[in-house]
Amino acid sequence: MSVNVGNIDRIVRVIFGLILIAYAIPLGFPMTGWNWVGWIGLIPLGTALVGNCPLYSIVGVSTCPKKP
């Protein structure tokens, strides 16, 4: 499993994941009945921590800088 998620991409994924989880808990967001959707935020958090996005691997994309 190679790293295909760059540093900026990781930061964006962590922020987006935390916002979604805050919606699920609801921290600062109203209860709507759709708050369970916020748990999808675990996916971007996991890919940011591991550094590998399975969708990037399938499509052949990498946001990691190329090593010489």
Image: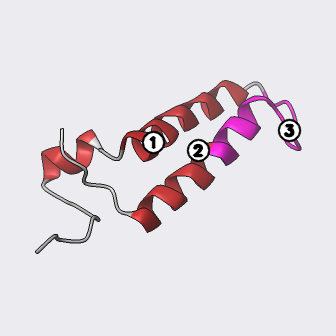
45 part of magenta stretch: no
Question: Residue at the spot x=54%, y=33% of the render?
Answer: 42
Q: Looking at the image, do the residues carrying marks 1 and 2 touch, with CB atoms under 8 Å apart?
A: no
Q: Which image quadrant for residue 2? A: top left
Q: Is residue 66 left or right of residue 20?
A: left
Q: Which segment did they paint magenta?
A: 18-32
Q: Position of residue 65 (x, y in %)?
A: 25, 71
Q: Which residue in the structure is indicated by mark 1?
A: 49
Marks 2 and 3 sit apart, C-alpha to C-alpha, by 14 Å
Q: Is residue 41 above or below residue 59?
A: above
In the structure shown, which secondary structural element does the residue marked by tag 2 occupy? helix
Q: Is residue 40 left or right of residue 27?
A: left
Question: Residue at the spot x=75%, y=39% of the render?
Answer: 22
- Looking at the picture, the colour scheme in use is secondary structure
Q: Position of residue 49 (x, y in %)?
A: 45, 42
Q: Does any portion of residue 37 appear in the rendered image?
A: yes
Q: Which mark is residue 17?
A: 2
**Three-letter code for the amino acid on which mark 2 is drawn:** Gly
Q: Position of residue 24 (x, y in %)?
A: 72, 31
Q: Looking at the image, do the residues carrying marks 3 and 1 touch, with CB atoms under 8 Å apart?
A: no
> How many neighbours does mark 3 have within 10 angstroms: few (below 14), some (14-19), or many (20 or more)?
few
Q: Which residue in the structure is indicated by mark 3?
A: 27
Q: Identify which residue, 39 or 34, lies in the foreground.
A: 39
Mark before the other along the chain sequence, 3 or 1: 3
